Image (spheres, coloured by chain):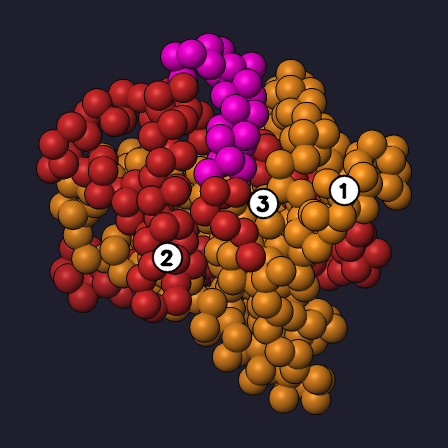
Amino acid sequence: MASNKDTADKPRFLDPKLHLVVLGIVVISELIRQRRFTIGPGVVLLLPMLYALVLGVLTTPRFLKITNEEQVKTSSPLITISVMLLVAKLGTVVGPSLKQIASAGLPLVLQEFGMLFCPLLAMPVAVALGLGREAVGATYSICREGAIAITGQVYGLDSPEGRGTLGTYIFGTLFGAIYMGLFAGLIASLGWFHPWAVGMACGVGSASMMSASAGAVAAALPEASADVLAFAAASNLLTNVDSVWSDLFLALPLANFTYRFWCKVFGKKAYPPSTPK
Amino acid sequence: MVRGKDIAAILAIVCGVSLIGNWIAVNIDPIKALPGMLILGLISLLGWWLSAILPWKLPSIVYISLIGILFTTPWTPGSEWILSHTNNANFLALCTPILAYAGISIAKDLDQFAKMSWKIAIVAMFVLSGTFIGSCIIAHVMLKITGKI
């Protein structure tokens, strides 16, 4: 088979079988649809993309052997490219809301820098627990879809950094709403911060985290509930606008710095950054 | 390295897969969602091309995000037309194929994932709490400084 020889050193990006398998996974995942479970005070949300991740794993040579080793390798750059469509879509979500954001005021804009507390607060924990470069991927951001795109392009998703980002992403997708609901409700009831400030903080993650945390805060502070929900929504909108930029240019360099710092403090070996394949 | 022709072909395939996922997820048939998906594909391609020809080395998503925003601001002529089409392509439906490729790709790292297991859950909780507290502190201080509270 001459054609195989020609493509031996070049991944077969257009391999029809690989894309058909992905199509099959997508169809099955979307047919299962979103599911929510109520556990105590919070909601566990299952999204089609999570089923797709699990089904993707199941097709590989280790399990059902529907995909082969070469297709596994080819998938990695395909993530980076398919993520482009998602980022384009994110851009078109942000564009129309620029006017509202411009009028939102300084506190709302500046509280977005709260996300820099992630690499500051979570990095020592990650390094102490023995994570390597996974720590950088896991802590530089709250790890929503934009962060998957950034990690994928800067390090590759099949790198330690990629595993870290996917780890936080999966935890956030599964338990983010329930955890943020509990945590935000607790912080609101402590009364340390003005309800408006807590409302803005509710917007830092995904839409489902925002709904859960703002709902919990509104329940804890009924007299301020309308303001809380409005500030949470505005802050969530703003997070969509700035996260690709602030994650890439501020949080990621900060995470790399704090990683090296805490490795030194704990006497662990600091590994160099991965490069995408 | 992946060439432009490959990128275009892969984007076309992923657009096709997303159209079918979109159809099931939000019940918008592929013909109706096609123009919106094509626009997203073209924005992606344009952004990739810019990242390839411009001298400074930035990931293509920086340009793609910027073009997506510039095309759809309230001040951009024709932005309503673009939005009327891109609104037919659901955000979550676009995520599903990406995670399918990711699943296939990361299966070989399952042992390393298993090694992180409970540790990543703890780290993730600190990440979520850290962002939340950070935003609370900054927002509270700024509201005080600007005299709003």
Could you tell me how far apart the alpha carbons at marks 3 and 2 are, in whole angstroms?
18 Å
Residue A275 image point, x, y percent: 59, 67
Front residue of this view, candidates A41 and B90: B90
Say if B97 sits above or below A74 in the image: above
**At label 2, which amino acid type do we have?**
Ser
Q: Which chain is orange?
A: A
Q: Residues within 10 Å of mark 3 (few under 14, many from 20)?
A: many
Q: Is residue B31 magenta?
A: yes
Question: Comparing marks 1 and 2, which lies closer to the viewer?
Answer: 1
What chain does mark 1 sit on?
Answer: A
Could you tell me how far apart the alpha carbons at marks 1 and 3 are, in whole angstroms?
28 Å
Q: Residues within 10 Å of mark 1 (few under 14, many from 20)?
A: few
Q: Which chain is red?
A: B
- Pick out the residue farthest to the front: A2
**At label 3, which amino acid type do we have?**
Ile
Residue drawn at x 62%, y 60% as measured from the top left: A277
The residue carrying mark 1 is: A2
